[in-house]
Amino acid sequence: MLPIPYLRDNREAVIKGLRKKHFANAAEAVEGVLSLDQRRRDAQTQLDNTLAQSNNLAREIGALMKAGKKEEAEAAKDQTASLKTQAKELDEAMRNAEEELQRLLVTLPNVPHSSVPEGRTAGDNEVVLQHGDIPQLYAGAVPHWDLIKKYDIIDFELGVKIAGSGFPVYKGKGARLQRAMINFFLDEALNAGYTEIQPPVLVNEASGFGTGQLPDKEGQMYFAPEDGLYLIPTAEVPITNLYRDVILEPKDLPVKNVGYTPCFRREAGAWGAHVRGLNRLHQFDKVEIVRVELPENSYAALEEMSGHVQGLLQKLGLPYRVLRLCGGDMGFASALTYDMEVYSAAQGRWLEVSSVSNFEFFQASRLKLRYRDENKKTSLLHTLNGSALALPRILAALLENNQSENGITIPEVLRPYTGFDQI
RNA sequence: GGAGAGAUGGCAGAGCGGUUUAAUGCGGCGGUCUUGAAAACCGUUGAGGGUUACACCUCCGGGGGUUCGAAUCCCUCUCUCUCCGCCA
């Protein structure tokens, strides 16, 4: 949610930014918000004045009653009726404006950073850098969905029996490799100064709103209606919401949290080509890094997070590239997003394994996440997050890229965690 | 699942129809004192809206009601805690 004062002060820049994101009717929406804001303020000013009058009157009546001047008190009471109806009308007008304003405001996406490239689709994303050599596979190389059967490390049919499609069952070395990656990713984050968090994987509606999943994107989350709880699509939701309605002191900053959770996504309507095997799942594991930063530091933090993720990929020996997403392809809440993609050699495709974003104060505005500066003034903070990393596609690339006649080689860095070096 | 209790400012905790513009304590901040610190003492210290700045308005879990006036009374919802039951 864009803060209203920001909209007021940057009307033209916001409209331009929304257009970059291909938001329809950007100018009308912004003008609409601003005029509703004006309407709300006008109504509130009148309401405040009316309330001030009736407060004064009530105080007078109290004083008269105390002084035993009953008749004068009764006379004063007669004056309150009109003030009351007036206040009621104004209150209604104010609420209507406020409600309409909110309804419109929450539909506005974040404004992209100036470095975000123009463009509409994934094809318009900018390749920032590419690292590592594309591996040459041996003649008998196959995609990961064949490898997992061959070595019996993941069973999709069993998952279908237990839950449904997109819920894999990891077995034997497959399960141990999962656990190894989670621990490796967590340890790397701890070494980089992050604090480990184990959050709930079900969240309430307020949390879904705080990070921008609600309203509107309900369809992407699993929902438990009896309890009004959503299964998290990412650890970003619970970990960022730890800071909902929080005012931090400068000494608390920056906040650097990391958490491992399973993630649940309905992916309604998202199935089609290119979703075989591990490429798209309803449940998957992810280690997520979340940061809360002073506005002036947030872009340095974003670069640092990007570097951290790249470090992981380098240690795993996976060829990767970094994309700066174009306006049309970035998320609703993001101001700047880097996607990290690894090359999955047997599929011959780049797979997205991480998305690192700066939300600036878009989430903070919904969360009411603020800090108190030296002058004791409160102002909004910036939030960021990134996958470090999402497991399934990393696994897919590892299996495909490291296969040979003799089996699949486990990267050095994972061996202390797996206890084996070959599948 | 059953029974009971409760929700007040960063925390603890009074207030139960009219100077509550929410007492008091702790914590935080500033000062006095001190070589420095601690202690003590003095002052200060919630959030949001609004204003150039004041004024002013709202907020005592959410919503509604009674009243000239509600933290205080009534209705309703939500959540939390305790005990019992079940259970990892």
Image (cartoon, rainbow, N blue to C red):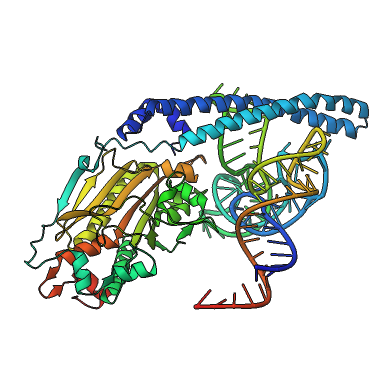
Quadrant occupied by the C terminus of chain A = bottom left
Horizontal side of A407 relative to A49 (left or right) equals left
> Compared with residue A149, is residue A366 higher up or lower down, i.e. above or below?
above
- Coordinates of residue A2 in the picture (x, y in percent): 43, 36
Total numbered labels: 0
Frontmost residue, B68 versus B33 = B68
- Coordinates of residue A318 in the picture (x, y in percent): 18, 60
Horizontal side of A389 relative to A7 (left or right) equals left
Q: In percent of the image, x 91 and y 32: which residue is there?
A: A67
Extreme residue in the left direction: A139
Frontmost residue, B18 versus A403 = A403
Quadrant occupied by the N terminus of chain A = top left
Q: Quadrant of residue A297?
A: top left
Q: In percent of the image, x 47 and y 47: which residue is there?
A: A210
Whether residue A316 appears in this view of the structure is no
> Compared with residue A288, is residue B43 higher up or lower down, i.e. above or below?
above
Q: In percent of the image, x 38 and y 28: which residue is there?
A: A25
Whether residue A247 appears in this view of the structure is yes
Frontmost residue, A153 versus A83 = A153
> Compared with residue A229, is residue A111 higher up or lower down, i.e. above or below?
above
- Coordinates of residue A189 in the picture (x, y in percent): 32, 61
- Coordinates of residue A352 in the picture (x, y in percent): 25, 53
Q: Quadrant of residue A39?
A: top right
> Compared with residue A168, is residue A47 higher up or lower down, i.e. above or below?
above
